[in-house]
Each structure stands twice: as structure tokens, then as C-alpha cells.
Image: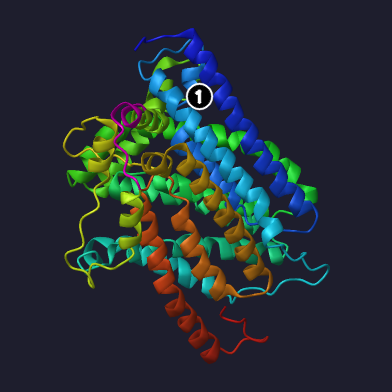
Amino acid sequence: MTSCNPELQVEIFWTVAVAVLLSAIVLVAVLSRAARGRGHLGFQLAAVFSFWSVHWLGTVGHGLPWYCNSNSEFTLIGAVECAWAMGAMTLGMLVCPWLAPAKRTAGPASPPRPPSALPIVCIGLGVFFELSAGVLSAIPSSTAVLITLKGLTLAGLMLKIWDSMLQGRPVVAMRWTILSLMIPLVGMIGGGFAGSGLANAALVFLFALSCIPGKTLRPAIVLAPILFYCSLSLVLNYLANRTELRARVWGGESYDARIAWLSEVATNFEWFSITEPRHLDLLDGRLNQNSLVGAAVNYTSRTGQYANGETVVSAFLAMIPRVIWPDKPPNSTNAAVTKYTGLEFADGTSVGIGQVMEFYINYGRTGVVAGFFLLGLVYSLLDLTLHRSLLSGEFGRFVSYFLIAVATLQLINSLAELMASIAAGLVLRPLLNAGFRAWNAVRRPATAPAPAG
């Protein structure tokens, strides 16, 4: 492959432009529905953000005339398939309200407030499962359940933001939103990872935006690009220093020493520059799943070696807990990526297959379009369901569906990981609802108890 090809750069530039256009369509559609009284909770926008963080941020540089990269050919091939996926997802989001029309938001009547202790309980439980995951993971079939239960922290933060806005206290809501920035910080100090934490913080931020009344939303939208730039710069600095960070964390260095080192890194903070090739290299190395998708498209088209539904069947089998099926075959995404791209990876390297690649290696572009059309429907339906649950005061229903919803946003995961998390959420839903019913039965609120959902 040529390291710098102007024709490839132009094609990639216009493919990225298509992704920008599709993102704008989703944003306009969501905001226009909200202006007509058909609310949302930012979940569809979070799905678009997930697409960008996994597939597009690292691809942007390949379309710039001053940046050359040997992976540009594969990146273009993968970007085309990703554009098809994003287009299908956008269509699914646009069609869903016609299939499941949303009820208009009630006029002057204020939605019920969540029980005052509920958000704190959710946050506390989420933190508990985060801190005790290492111990509890020894329990058979607990991994997917623990990952799902960690989402209680996000649910609690969102309930606090929702409650603050209902009380007309936007400053308090802003404080809880800013508190979500602690999620990636804790992830870096505790485990050496920040990616999922940043995605979770973005989800909370988008939820907070959805709670802002239309008249005051414009200033927030103006500030959003500034926050995005700051976040991108934070990601850049994390990527530049993550090898040393993980060496310190995994080497057992004390928390005080880790915090002191992070403080030192902060003093040398670099702001992202789109004209700096080193910055674009860092983004390409971690936030460009399109190059792997392109490698898979190239390899399968040359060899004719497709999965033909094999990994889809495995995904449904992944919903069966190992405690029920002890001999269930292991799910190795590294092995699958190697098998369908022909690429080898160093020992200890974790490579996500991502759903664009997995749909493609099974059914080609048809699988990509069909799969992401269904995901678009799911994202929109979950957004509507979560919003209705808050409006009606069904807080148990909100939390249980939210835990399922968060699992669907991980586009870098395999279908097996996705289905295992969804199965965990479905198993937890009746348990959570039973817990909320017991809560409502014993507490003595000033008003009638909110239904469990």
C-alpha cells in the first residue's frame, strides 16, 4: 500500500462527510421531536457518539492532505461499510417513531419526582459492584451480571439530574453532571482504563442536555463543541501516556503515587491539534476500528471465508449462563479477528471485533445494513421507553431498562458480549422490580408511591 495517496484522502474525506451528515440528521430529528413535545433522553445521540468514538475519530486524519498513513486503504474500505451501517441505523431511528408512536409530553402537569434515596442507593450499589468486581467475578456466570450492575451508578446520576431539573435547580443538575467526570478518572487510577468511563460520562452529559428546556438549550449546544474539544484533548493525553499508566497500575503502585504521576502529566497537558501528525497517529491507533473492518472485508472477499451466521448463533448461545452449561465454548474475539482478517496480534493484546465487522463477516454488506437497521430501531425504542418511564414515575422500569440499554451501546464488543449483557439485564429486571416493589411497600412517602414498572 502507498503511504500517502491523495485520491484515497479525498475519498475518505467525503466518506467522513457522509458520517457527519448522518449524525446531523439524527440530531435534527431528535431535537425536532423534542420541540413538538415528544421527548428523548439522549440515548440515540449516545449511539451516534459511540459510532464516532469507535469508528470515525481515528479515520478523520486519513482524509486530511497533510497526514499520511499506511493503513489508509483498509481505512477507506472499512469506512464505506461503516457509512452503510450508520445510514441503516439512522433510518431505523427515523422509522421507529412511526412504528411505536410516542405520547406527547404532558402539558403543565409536572412528572413525579423519584424517591429521594433512590438515586443515592443506585450510585452506591454501582460503586460497590465496581469495587468488588474482582472478588465477585469468581462466582460462575457473574461476569456479564457484574458489568450490567455497574450501570447502576449511571442510572443514579441520571435520576439525580432529572430530580434536580424537576425542582427547577439547574445548577445542582450541572454539579451532578460534572461529577460524572469522576467515572473515567476512577477508571484510570483504579484499572488503567479510561475509554468506557469517558463513554459513560458522555452518556450522562447527553442525558443532562435532554433535560434542559428548549428555550435554554441553545447556549448548551454552543458549549458542546468546546466540551468535545476538551474531552478529545483528554483522550489524546490518555493515549499518549496509557502504557506507563498501566505499568504503574498493574505493577501495584500505591494510589498516592498514581495520583502524583497523573498530576505531573496534567502539568504537561497537550491540547489536540488537527495539524499535528503525532496526535492523529494516536487517534488512529486506538479510535479507528474502520482499518480492521477494511482488513476483514479485504480478507473475506479474497478467500471467500465467511462465518455464514456462525458467530450470530454463538451470540445467542452466549445468553445461556455457564453455570447452566459448564462446557460452553469460550468466546475469543482475538481469535475471530485473526481468523477473518488474517492479521496476527501480540500476546496480551485485546482486540475488539466490533459489530460492523461481525455483521459483515457473516452476511456481507446485507448483514451490516440489516443488523444496524434493527439496532437503530432498538436505540430509538429504548430512548422512548426510558423517557416514558420517567414521565410516568415508573422509576424501577427506568432503571431496569436502562441497564439493558447501556449494554447495547458498546459497538466495539462482539455480538456474543452484547447478547450476554442483554441476557443479564433481562434476568436482573424482575429482581430489580421486586426490590422496588418491596421498597414502595415499606417506605412512607408524603405522596403516593411510584409504581415499580
Q: Secondary structure at mark 1?
A: helix
In the image, farthest residue toward the right: 108
Which residue is denoted by mark 1 in the rendering? 60
Q: Please tell me which residue is depicted at 55% across the width and 25% down the height of the picture.
A: 15
The amino acid pointed to by label 1 is Val
Give coordinates of residue 109: x percent, y percent. Answer: 80, 72
Q: Which residue occupies the foreground of this view, 360 or 106?
A: 360
Furthest residue in direction front, as rendered: 304
Up the image or down, 172 lies above or below 432; here it is above
Question: Is residue 313 in sight in this rendering?
Answer: yes
Query: Quadrant of the rendered structure where residue 221 is?
Result: top right
Q: In the rendered view of the protein, which quadrant contains the C terminus?
A: bottom right
Above or below — where is 25 with respect to 315?
A: above
Q: Residues within 10 Å of mark 1 (few under 14, many from 20)?
A: many
Let me know if residue 57 appears in the view. Answer: no
The residue stretch that appears in magenta: 298-308
Q: Is residue 447 magenta?
A: no
In this orientation, which residue lies closer to the viewer: 330 or 32? 330
- x and y percentages locating residue 449 in the rendered image: 62, 85
Quadrant in which residue 358 is drawn:
top left
Q: Quick check: is 306 in the magenta stretch? A: yes
